[in-house]
Image (cartoon, grey):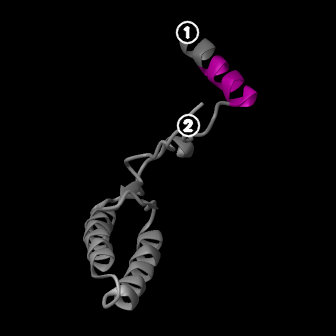
Amino acid sequence: MARQSPPSPVHDPLITVVGAIGVPYLCSSIEAVDGHLADLHRRARLLARKFPRLAKSYRSDIDQLLDRRCWLAMSPTPAPTLAAIPAPTPASDAASASIAASDAA
């Protein structure tokens, strides 16, 4: 029986940049993007002589991350995510019901 690979994780396209070789970079804030940029710049510089194709893919990822950084800098609010939407609580449901009842009266 052939071994099956695990399913690939689903990445939120609003906050994830997928690099040239498929590496996902979580980019929910400018600080996160800056961290990825610094790391990739260091890696590209260290590997440029020995692995030029890998360094080239890192530079491609840097270009994509710089685009995302510009988008985040121009956005008036942080990128929305499904995790940022609070789950309803019993108290909020009760408050909504009382507001709806007072509007109906």
The residue stretch that appears in magenta: 89-99
The question of residue 16 being in magenta is answered with no
The kind of residue tagged 1 is Ala
Name the residue tied to disc 2: 4
Image quarter of residue 60: bottom left
Q: Position of residue 29 (x, y in %)?
A: 45, 65
Q: Secondary structure at mark 1?
A: helix
Q: Pick the residue in front: 54 or 13.
A: 54
- Relative vertical location of residue 99 with respect to residue 59 in this rendering, above or below: above
Image quarter of residue 67: bottom left
- Label 1 crowd bin: few (<14), some (14–19), many (20+), radius 10 Å: few
Numbered label attached to residue 87: none
Q: Position of residue 10 (x, y in %)?
A: 48, 42
| Residue at x 65%, y 30% (from the top left corner) | 88
- Relative vertical location of residue 19 with respect to residue 54 in this rendering, above or below: above
Tell me the chief SS of the magenta region: helix
- Label 2 crowd bin: few (<14), some (14–19), many (20+), radius 10 Å: few
- Relative vertical location of residue 54 with respect to residue 4 in this rendering, above or below: below
Numbered label attached to residue 104: 1
| Residue at x 41%, y 87% (from the top left corner) | 42
Q: How many marks?
A: 2
The answer for how far apart the CA atoms under marks 2 and 1 are is 56 Å
